[in-house]
Image (cartoon, coloured by chain):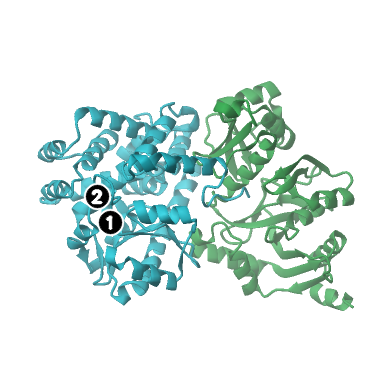
Chain colours: A green, B cyan
Amino acid sequence: MDPLGSLAPGRLSAALAAGALAVEVGPFRARIRSNILALSDHLLKYYADYPLVPPDEMADFQLTLSTPGGLRRWYRRQVRFRYQSYEPFSPLPLDQAKHAFEWGFNWAIGAQATRFLMLHAATVERDGQAIVLPAYSGSGKSTLCAALVHNGWRLLSDEFALISLDGQALYGLGRPISLKNESIAVVRRHFPTAEISEVVSGTRKGTVGLLSPPEGSVLIGKAAVPRWILAPRFEPDATPQALRVERAKMAFYLSGQAFNYHVLGRQGFEALCGLVEACDCLALGYASLEQALALVEEATTLADPVARSAAAAP
Amino acid sequence: MAASMLIKALRDPACLKQASARDWERLIYEAGASDLTPRVAAQIDAAGLADIVPERAGYHLDLARLLADSQHRAVAVELAALTEALAEHDLPFLLLKGGAYIVGGFAASQGRTLSDIDILVRKEDIPVVEERLEAAGWIYANRDPYDQEYYRRWMHELPPMMHIDRHSALDVHHTVTPPTSAMAVEGARIFERAVFGGPTGHPLIGLPMLADLVLHSAVHLFNDSEFDAGLRDLSDLDLLFRAFSQQDDFWPSLLARAKALGLGSSLAYAVGLCRAYFETPIPAEALDGVMAQAPSRLVRGALSALFTAALNPSEPAGEPWTREPALFALYVRGHALRMPPRLLLPHLVRKARRRARGEEEGEPAPA
């Protein structure tokens, strides 16, 4: 299948307007419909390497971004997002169109959940082995994920862990990493070469920006083996430490972070058990990104990271 | 409407043998928009056509089967909790709509999903029922004083409740139609003829008699302000008509009941649109009886056109321009049926302003 980037910009926007554009993102195929020019720039910038779905094949769902008519055509223009026929959030100001697309796309993926147990977690891979970073919003998951992809790890996803139903394989989606508020400055400070764009303030989530994973640091289309579950927690005055978490406890915690655990029923339970069995389960507490990276490095290279971290603590 | 893959598939799943990949994509889209994917999956299974489903479409049907199964399990959990909260305290209730189809094992339980459990309680029990439910963990999802007042004054149900642990939604009705509307029905009349015990597992928990089950479904579909699940409700009616027609006394009982309760016009729309959409077979005699209770030709024609536009399941690009105005007209009509005109306009203006400010209840922030 040809990559999206093989389309000339003019043909891309024509295909978008006609509903003739469908792109394969990991295991999902999204048909994207829009008459908003900024969106074709966005796709060319962040999705150029993703395969186009041939015209006679099916997509899983449709994402429609349109500009509402009426008065809104002239005054405070907006973007309206729809997943299938459903509108998960109210129209946003037009300058947030690219973020509306990314948020809406996440929403759509969260609604799929067919062949996977799907957790709200960042996932990264190195040498075929993967870390799952589950966390509540605001715990520093995306910041740590951004730091890891600048440190030799490849991005599977900054939002989703797609886990096979035996718990033994993780699948990637790639896509830009969403950064919010302070994390934009933190990532810029640590990684001056980091490419963060589309920074918009005053959204419902505050100031937001999109980070392109560095060249060659994305893994899609190939499964990785889950090896570690590291629950990150950033606290300004934390002592850096890794604490072992009982597998059963981690499974229970993860079930609360799952999009489709209740729908999968027994299969979901078995996938979750398979996952925690296959992984070292640790909670990481840290006060800076350096500490977090050091803890991850220890956790993923040492035989007994907890003993080491306990010995290092004052 | 014949161009809709969803309608074609529900009428005759065998037509999917000729479907292209893009047809399947449209089917999955349309079915999802109407909450009918599990029903399509069930029809395909029942017709022995599982082999013809392409892999990618199959993922969606698999998920839909899982979803319907998990919801049917959840209904049993909710029923057990309601039994403990109400029936065990001598408070009888009936299950309505989706919950009734599933617990009663009626034809419309096939691939039926539901967003809430609907129950009917005796009007005089309402204060005790509220107390009991709140003690058992059901809370009002929305405590806005205007909405609370609105429901209590104009509606046939309490404001929607939600269970604090399970987050399941519960609608407590005291009758089946808005009490101020032209088709007001005393809840006690539904109770009188209901069937208690049996599949509900408790002598104080009942299901409406078959005729009432159908009439309630029809009244709900054709007099509400929202049409999100309109096609699913119409498909429910299609399945119920087909199954119940096997019983000799069903149609006479339904016609007599519609007349007695004054719900003949809703029944006429239900029968008319089921025939138009799903080619539902209706015995000739019964059809005459239905038409005898139908509204005038002019009213019928105008409303049928509105319903048809509102029930259209097509993709956004193929959406006819008539859909939005039809939905709006039906929205206003749904409210007009239950409120006197001098209150209707202020109420709708208030709702519109709230929506413009983005305050409509329960809307999640983008994640």
Name the chain letter of the residue that bears numbered label 2: B
Quadrant placement of the N terminus of chain A: top right
The residue at the far front in this view is B342
Q: Which mark is residue B184?
A: 2
**Where A306 sits versus A2, above or below?**
below
Where is residue B188 shown, x and y percent of the image?
21, 60
Residue drawn at x 54%, y 66% is A269
Under mark 2, the amino acid is Ala
Closer to the camera in the image, A116 or B244: B244
Describe residue B324's horizontal placement relative to residue B233 as left or right: right
The quadrant in which residue A162 appears is: bottom right
Closer to the camera in the image, B317 or A247: B317
How many residues crowd around disc 2 within 10 Å: few (fewer than 14), some, or many (20 or more)? some
Considering the numbered disc 2 on the image, is that residue within a helix, a strand or a loop?
loop
What's the CA distance linking mark 2 and mark 1?
A: 8 Å
How many residues crowd around disc 1 within 10 Å: few (fewer than 14), some, or many (20 or more)? many
Considering the numbered disc 1 on the image, is that residue within a helix, a strand or a loop?
loop
Where is residue A247 shown, x and y percent of the image?
65, 73
Where is residue B4 shown, x and y percent of the image?
38, 32
Q: Which mark is residue B175?
A: 1
Under mark 1, the amino acid is Thr
Mark with earlier residue (2, 1):
1
The quadrant in which residue A309 appears is: bottom right
Quadrant placement of the C terminus of chain A: bottom right
**Where B139 sits versus B179, above or below?**
below
Residue drawn at x 60%, y 26% is A73
**Number of callouts in the render?**
2
- Is the same chain shared between marks 2 and 1? yes
Name the chain letter of the residue that bears numbered label 1: B
Verify CB contact (< 8 Å) between mark 2 and mark 1: yes
